[in-house]
Image (spheres, helix red, strand yellow):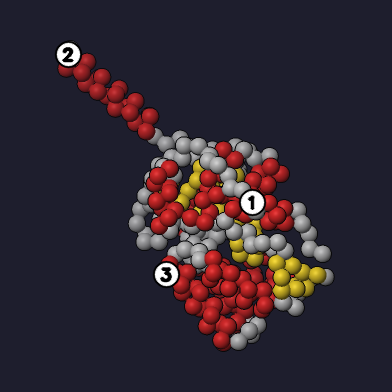
């Protein structure tokens, strides 16, 4: 009797321990007040979308070999470093703006569809794509949030079957690019403000939402939601994620994804960037 009682107690203890350590179902099916926000470069896609776009424009003779060499160097640096350097990203944006100046928005949107098939489709991380699909299958909206031009982001979101995209807005007048930006790039704290504004407009509860990024620059956006994920993280984000028990997934080496932990609660959102958020959500081209 003593042996049976001991065995039964051990079995119950084991079951209780398993129940307490089992991760709750996520994403939660049918939770319409939850959504997911994904960074693009090196999170959803290998490398930077802007650089792949530049390759496609070069193929179509939008600019000269000298400028292609600069794009190639920037892309190589990004791939090797795995982080977003503000100086490199600014240089890439300036190059892109000068290249598209005088071209029609509709023309670039059409070309963007072709460039996606040529250079981007094969660079989508399957693991991240599966995470996005899990949210879609749960009936939740999924948004890209990126510093890349909004036209590129919208093409990628549409081709992946996502809800939509927030991105940097290039100024256009009468459907023609002027070579200037509307406001500032959607980067760093501006992403958090864009997500906050979108959540308010959509009636979302950020504490039930998820965000995914590879870069420490996106800590403001990740801190805004109840379920932050570090995807293919740079060293600063990896350290931050471990300190706060955020989930972590790394698809760069093919090894089994490492789980750092379950997020405790949404942190403090970032300040500033309100102008970019308003642009991304409300402002129309003139």
Res. 143 visible in picture: no
Q: Relative to residue 44, is residue 103 drawn left or right?
A: right
| Horizontal and vertical percent position of residue 199 | 66, 44
Q: Pointer 3: residues within 10 angstroms few (<14), some, or many (20+)? A: few
Binning the other alpha carbons within 10 Å of mark 1 as few (below 14), some (14 to 19) or many (20 upward) gives: some
**Distance from Cα at disc 2 to Cα at disc 1:** 66 Å
What's the residue at 53%, 41% (across, down)? 267
Q: How many marks?
A: 3
Q: Residues within 10 Å of mark 2 (few under 14, many from 20)?
A: few
Quadrant occupied by the C terminus: bottom right
Q: Is residue 163 above or below residue 8?
A: below
Q: Where's residue 273, x and y in %?
A: 65, 53
The image shows residue 225 at horizontal and vertical percentages of: 55, 43
| Residue in the picture at 39% in, 34% down | 22
Contact between labelled residues 1 and 2, with CB atoms less than 8 Å apart: no
The residue at which mark 2 appears reads as: 2
- First in sequence, mark 2 or 1: give its number: 2
Comparing 192 with 16, the one in front is 192
Please determine whether, in this image, residue 206 is positioned above or below residue 131: above
Q: Check whether the beta carbons of the residues at disc 1 and disc 3 lie within 8 A of each other.
A: no
For label 3, the SS is helix
**Residue at point 42%, 69% (across, down):** 80
Q: Which residue is mark 1?
A: 272
Numbered label attached to residue 80:
3
């Amino acid at each position: 009797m003593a042996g049976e009682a001991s065995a039964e107690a051990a079995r119950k203890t084991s079951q209780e321990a398993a129940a307490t350590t089992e991760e709750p179902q996520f994403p939660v099916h049918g939770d319409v007040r939850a959504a997911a926000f994904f960074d693009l470069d090196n999170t959803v896609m290998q490398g930077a979308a802007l650089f792949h776009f530049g390759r496609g424009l070069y193929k179509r003779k939008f600019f000269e070999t000298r400028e292609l060499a600069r794009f190639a160097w920037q892309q190589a640096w990004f791939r090797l470093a795995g982080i977003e350097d503000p100086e490199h990203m600014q240089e890439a944006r300036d190059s892109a703006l000068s290249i598209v100046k005088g071209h029609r928005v509709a023309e670039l949107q059409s070309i963007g569809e072709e460039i996606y098939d040529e250079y981007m489709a094969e660079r989508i991380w399957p693991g991240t794509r599966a995470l996005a699909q899990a949210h879609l299958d749960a009936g939740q909206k999924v948004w890209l949030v990126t510093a890349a031009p909004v036209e590129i982001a919208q093409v990628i979101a549409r081709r992946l079957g996502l809800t939509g995209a927030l991105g940097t807005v290039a100024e256009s007048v009468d459907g023609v690019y002027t070579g200037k930006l509307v406001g500032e790039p959607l980067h760093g704290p501006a992403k958090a403000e864009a997500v906050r504004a979108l959540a308010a407009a959509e009636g979302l509860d950020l504490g039930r939402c998820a965000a995914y990024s590879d870069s420490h620059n996106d800590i403001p956006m990740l801190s805004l939601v109840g379920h932050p994920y570090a995807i293919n993280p740079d060293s600063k984000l990896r350290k931050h994620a471990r300190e706060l028990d955020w989930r972590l997934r790394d698809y760069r080496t093919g090894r089994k994804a490492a789980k750092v932990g379950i997020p405790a609660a949404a942190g403090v959102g970032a300040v500033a960037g309100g102008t970019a958020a308003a642009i991304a959500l409300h402002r129309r081209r003139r």
